[in-house]
Image (tube, rainbow, N blue to C red):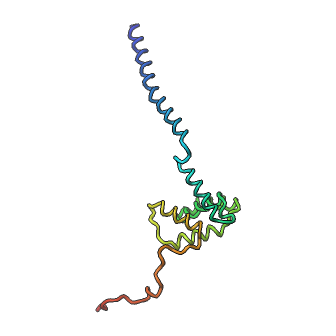
Amino acid sequence: MFRLRVLGVALGAATLCLCALPAGAQSGGAANNKAKPATANGTDSQNNEIADISKRLTGPAGNPECIWLGRRVVTLLWRDDLDTAFRHLDLYDRFGCPSPHIREAFRCVIRQGHIDPKAAATLNGRVRECWIDPNRAPDHPEPVADSAAKPPSGKPKK
């Protein structure tokens, strides 16, 4: 009976030791992840992008907080998430950012035409470019109204 208890305690201790080894390896890996530079999660590239836009824009629309919030408002408006967009817009206004810039940037995004909803990079790039230059010409000019008024060519139907 004594031997069974000792054997049970030994097996329990061995199990605990074996279970603790992978946990130690995981925590060591987590410490290594924390030591990585911020570029691993994209914050450095985002900061560089905001700094680049700040250099290109003058006035409050070029302030980092205005860029960060304003671009999100325009993106949310495009995605029809109006509740979230208006909450961001309230913050945008509290920071003293120019409301007309939101309107102009959103107008620019709309003028550019259809965006594939599954291509987030395309939407983000368009919002970025329209934030920098809200008066930019559309990538794909719309057809002239006169061409829409022309009758279709071909044989008339009987």
Q: Is residue 44 visible?
A: yes
The residue positioned 41% from the left and 7% from the top of the image is 2
Farthest-out residue, left: 158
The residue positioned 45% from the left and 61% from the top of the image is 119
The residue positioned 62% from the left and 57% from the top of the image is 51
Which corner quadrant of the image does residue 17 belong to?
Answer: top left
Location of residue 94 in the rendering, given as x and y in whole percent from the top left corner: 70, 59
Q: Relative to the observer, which residue lies in front, 17 or 138?
A: 138
Which corner quadrant of the image does residue 19 belong to?
Answer: top left
Q: Relative to the observer, which residue lies in front, 22 or 81?
A: 22
Count up the numbered dots.
Answer: 0
Q: Is residue 83 visible?
A: no
Q: Relative to the observer, which residue lies in front, 20 or 88?
A: 20
Q: Is residue 47 above or below residue 101?
A: above
Quarter that holds the N terminus: top left
Farthest-out residue, top: 2
97 relative to 42 in the view: left or right: right
Quarter that holds the C terminus: bottom left
Location of residue 46 in the rendering, given as x and y in whole percent from the top left corner: 57, 54
Location of residue 140 in the rendering, given as x and y in whole percent from the top left corner: 47, 75
Q: Is residue 7 above or below residue 157?
A: above
Location of residue 151 in the rendering, given as x and y in whole percent from the top left corner: 39, 90
